[in-house]
Image: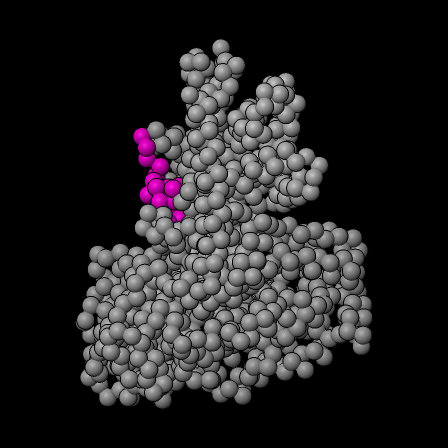
């Protein structure tokens, strides 16, 4: 087990390095000079001299060879220095420190909502197989998988406005300072963001439960006269949980990626929205840092999920 | 042990399910009080007693407020923070003369020398702001401005003629970024303003310039303190904004909002009425519409939204009881920019053929709500343009009796193309930046060119930054493009869209014919409006009959100012860059 954990940690470094290379190269391949964009402004109507452009390129460091820029960036990150946003001229670490918790809160809430809705839905669907409850739950699950996240977000906004004449309050409220307002702002984006995950988890739960129900030990449990609730929760659900956990693990990356769209629709000032704005502004340093943070989180979460397998299923060994 | 943990976990999950569902419902039920949700995130400042006027200013129309609850006056009501909508978060450079799209955020912090009167129904009515009065001398080029004696900067120091001279020079400083204000550079050169006395300043224009006053009255032309500008303070920081205006900058939350609060010592007695404003950044169209419908935002920061004219008209219709929509004509346009440096678009016959073949009525119908003025080179129904009825009789603008494209125009277009050697099936790529409605406009243009000329068209959507880079490298054939204009007067319009150095024209490679340049110069200096209109007609005829230039205008787009009916004393502005101080609006009922 320890060897496996060490191996996984060792894989972290080359994977992250590959990500840094890809991000760095891709951003430079896309046309658009950040210095020019800064001087031209959002509307593209800025006027500037060649000297101003040269000065700004020197300030941003984009006039240096690409290899130097790349190594400088990597060296900075190793020292915990993410640099300065090219567009806003503010420390990136400050922005990430402010935005990352918001995105994490949204993702966590979405995942929580997905789980708490999907698990009962999947279980009921399996237990009441081929009944109206099963059909209803499968329709919901298929709809959730079929509809893209941004579309769900738009629908949620539409229904809130049309049915309740209401939208989440504007202006972000911090969770610890104003939890009620924060919940109002976060619940609906979390529903939209987690809907796909909910649907997927519900489908996996159902199929996994149906598989477990056919196992001998379930028949044995029933023959022993155990209550159905105990059989479902203690025996079936626990053993069906492994594929659910697997699917959830790799869904976390998708969930974080989904925040990019959902944060824009619901005005959540998290990392996803910052990423969109940064791409529009060609804020290389900011984009690189955000992508690195996301890549790090996805890799770390995948590792945690892998390690959880062994904890949940003692039959799994990594040697 | 694991089983016990598992059982505890499942029990907790069930409790959590119940709690979350309950909270979700509660959160939605909280919706029944939209006024709560519209409350600003920051505490509103207590309305302060307006500073007493030491000058002979006209008596204010409102009764000064007492601290506490909003007070009703003869006309105005004090108090309230107005939540406003903006569609894009700007960069963090707030120098008053730098970026044109910051004007909406900083206008309330500063005053201009003049301003467009925010309290009359004539959008072109210009009045003094820092200037109490002004006159043009007999030479036709010397303006004398008399400043209000009680005007002060936020730090309490008086506004002087020296500040005005410093500001005028800063506005045309070619060493700095001055995208908007350099439009007056042909008329005003640094050093041409001088101090007469503490409160009197003289400004000379290079030539007689009838559009000089309409231009410097726009909100982009703000006055700043010389001492502040020359100090070590970073004047581009939001928190360092120090003007003489009715509001002070307060909080700025990146990607979320920025706030302004009432200047308690504002030198204009009784103003402003509102305690402040919060500018919320809402990029998503659906969320923006929802925010207006639910009253979470009460107006746009400036008459620019990311909604099309058609969407705005639909919003107005569905929310007629709560929203007013001001459609400001002739201050922006939508069309196609043509790269005249490449074949076959370097041939004037091809450009003329494009002008004849495009069905502008279809563009107006689909994107302009059916009411946008047709895209003649000069906006119709203005003192210097044709009437709309006249325009619709012109080749390229007229329709066939059944409402479709005029057959005579299509035949002429095909003849010109054949003459220029451009055959059916010609491949053209239309670049469309993914901003405003450019991609949709490009799709319709592609369809029209296929239908009307038999061209093989493709649309290439690209992000805005890439598009601008490709413009600069002239790496495009034709592109969907629009622009907004400072004010609806001839010089700002023609100067920006057709004259060398104009914003988009510089990337088209078009070299304006000498006749066109001569006519522009002649009209620009003509003080007699009738004579000027005649020269402008000659310019327009030149474009219609000889060289249409590189910009194919579909229609003169409306710019949209959405205002909740709670907002009182709002009058339609002349353009998107005027009346942005918001010192004379108030809320009734309270915001």
Membership of B79 in magenta stretch: no
Name the image quarter holding the N terminus of chain A: top left
- Residue A156 position, x and y percent, is 55, 53
**Is A268 left, or right, of B277 in this rendering?**
right
Residue B384, percent from left and from top: 56, 82
The residue at 34%/41% (across/down) is A97
Q: Is residue B156 visible?
A: yes
Question: Which residue corresponds to the image point at 34% horizontal and 80% vertical from the top-left?
Answer: B77
Q: Nearer the viewer, residue B263 or B362?
A: B263
Q: Is B358 above or below relative to A38? A: below
Is B563 in front, or is B461?
B563
**Above or below, A88 relative to B13:** below
Q: Is residue A105 left or right of residue A233?
A: left
* Left-right relation of B330 to A211: left
Q: Which residues are magenta?
A: A79-101
Residue A198 sits in which quadrant? top right
Q: Looking at the image, is B430 positioned above or below residue A200?
A: below
How far from the left and from the top, in percent, is residue B485? 50, 69
Residue B255 higher or lower than B45, as above or below: above
Tell me which residue sits at (33%, 57%) in the image: B252
Whether residue A34 is visible here, answered yes or no, is no
Give the image location of residue B372, x and y in percent.
62, 73
How many numbered badges does the structure rendering display?
0
In the image shown, does A278 or B291 lie closer to the viewer?
Answer: B291
């Amino acid at each position: 087990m320890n060897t496996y954990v060490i191996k996984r940690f060792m894989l972290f470094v080359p994977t992250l390095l590959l990500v840094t290379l890809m991000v760095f190269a891709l951003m430079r391949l896309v046309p658009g000079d950040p210095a020019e964009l800064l001087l031209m402004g959002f509307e593209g109507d800025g006027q500037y001299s060649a000297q101003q452009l040269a000065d700004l390129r020197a300030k941003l460091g984009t006039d240096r060879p690409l290899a130097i820029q790349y190594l400088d960036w990597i060296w900075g990150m190793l020292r915990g220095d993410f640099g300065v946003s090219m567009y806003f001229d503010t420390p990136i670490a400050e922005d990430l420190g402010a935005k990352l918790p918001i995105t994490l809160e949204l993702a966590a809430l979405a995942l929580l909502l997905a789980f708490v809705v999907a698990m009962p839905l999947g279980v009921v669907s399996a237990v009441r197989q081929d009944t109206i409850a099963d059909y209803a739950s499968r329709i919901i699950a298929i709809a959730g998988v079929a509809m893209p996240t941004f579309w769900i977000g738009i629908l949620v906004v539409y229904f809130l406005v049309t049915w309740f004449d209401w939208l989440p309050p504007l202006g972000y409220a911090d969770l610890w300072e104003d939890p009620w307002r924060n919940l109002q702002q976060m619940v609906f984006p979390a529903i939209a963001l987690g809907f796909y995950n909910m649907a997927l988890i519900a489908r996996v739960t159902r199929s996994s439960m149906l598989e477990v129900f056919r196992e001998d030990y379930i028949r044995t449990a029933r023959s022993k006269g155990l209550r159905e609730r105990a059989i479902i929760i203690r025996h079936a659900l626990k053993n069906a949980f492994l594929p659910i956990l697997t699917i959830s693990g790799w869904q976390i990356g998708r969930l974080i990626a989904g925040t990019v769209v959902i944060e824009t629709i619901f005005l959540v000032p998290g990392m996803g929205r910052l990423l969109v704005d940064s791409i529009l502004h060609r804020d290389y340093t900011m984009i690189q840092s955000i992508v690195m943070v996301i890549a790090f989180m996805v890799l770390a979460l995948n590792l945690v999920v892998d390690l959880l397998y062994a904890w949940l299923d003692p039959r799994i060994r990594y040697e | 042990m694991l089983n016990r943990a598992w059982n505890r976990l499942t029990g907790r999950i069930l409790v959590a399910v119940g709690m979350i569902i309950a909270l979700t419902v509660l959160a939605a039920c909280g919706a029944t009080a939209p006024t709560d949700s519209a409350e600003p995130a920051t505490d509103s400042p207590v309305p302060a007693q307006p500073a007493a006027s030491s000058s002979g200013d006209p008596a204010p129309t409102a009764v000064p407020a007492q601290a506490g609850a909003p007070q009703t006056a003869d006309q105005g009501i004090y108090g309230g923070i107005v939540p406003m909508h903006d569609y894009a978060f700007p960069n963090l450079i707030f120098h008053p003369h730098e970026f044109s799209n910051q004007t909406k955020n900083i206008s309330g912090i500063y005053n201009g020398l003049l301003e467009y009167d925010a309290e009359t129904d004539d959008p072109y009515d210009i009045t003094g702001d820092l200037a109490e009065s002004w006159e043009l001398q007999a030479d036709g080029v010397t303006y004398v401005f008399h400043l209000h004696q009680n005007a002060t900067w936020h730090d309490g120091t008086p506004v002087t003629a020296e500040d005005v001279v410093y500001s005028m020079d800063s506005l045309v400083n070619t060493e700095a970024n001055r995208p908007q204000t350099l439009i007056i550079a042909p008329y005003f050169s640094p050093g041409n303003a001088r101090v007469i006395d503490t409160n009197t300043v003289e400004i000379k224009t290079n030539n007689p310039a009838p559009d000089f006053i309409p231009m410097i009255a726009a909100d982009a032309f703000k006055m700043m303190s010389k001492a502040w500008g020359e100090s070590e303070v970073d004047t581009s920081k939001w928190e360092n904004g120090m003007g003489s205006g009715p509001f002070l900058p307060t909080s700025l939350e990146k990607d979320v909002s920025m706030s302004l609060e009432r200047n308690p010592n504002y030198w204009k007695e009784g103003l402003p009425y509102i305690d402040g404003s919060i500018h919320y950044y809402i990029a998503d169209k659906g969320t923006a519409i929802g925010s207006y419908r639910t009253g979470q935002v009460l107006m746009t920061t400036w008459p620019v939204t990311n909604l099309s004219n058609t969407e705005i008209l639909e919003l107005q219709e569905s929310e007629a009881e709560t929203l007013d929509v001001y459609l400001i004509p002739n201050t922006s346009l939508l069309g196609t920019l043509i790269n005249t440096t490449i074949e076959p678009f370097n041939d004037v016959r091809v450009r003329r053929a494009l002008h004849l073949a495009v069905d502008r009525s279809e563009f107006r119908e689909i994107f302009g709500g059916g009411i946008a003025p047709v895209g003649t080179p000069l906006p119709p129904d203005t003192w210097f343009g044709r009437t709309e009825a006249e325009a619709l009789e012109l080749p390229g603008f007229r329709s066939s009796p059944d409402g479709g494209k005029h057959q005579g125009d299509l035949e002429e277009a095909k003849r010109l193309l054949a003459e220029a050697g451009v055959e059916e099936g010609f491949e053209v790529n239309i670049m469309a930046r993914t901003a405003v409605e450019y991609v949709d406009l490009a799709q319709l243009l592609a369809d029209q060119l296929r239908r009307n000329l038999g061209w093989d068209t493709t649309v290439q959507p690209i992000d805005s930054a890439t598009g601008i880079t490709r413009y600069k490298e002239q790496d495009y054939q034709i592109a969907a493009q629009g622009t907004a204009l400072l004010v609806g007067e001839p010089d700002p319009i023609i100067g920006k869209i057709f004259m060398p150095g104009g914003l988009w024209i510089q990337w088209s490679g078009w070299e304006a014919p000498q006749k066109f340049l001569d006519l522009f110069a002649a009209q620009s200096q003509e003080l007699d409006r009738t004579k000027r209109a005649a020269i402008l007609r000659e310019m327009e005829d030149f474009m219609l009959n000889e060289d249409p230039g590189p910009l194919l205008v579909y229609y003169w787009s409306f710019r949209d100012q959405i205002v909740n009916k709670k907002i009182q004393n709002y009058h339609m502005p002349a353009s998107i860059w005027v009346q942005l101080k918001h010192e004379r609006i108030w809320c009734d009922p309270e915001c």
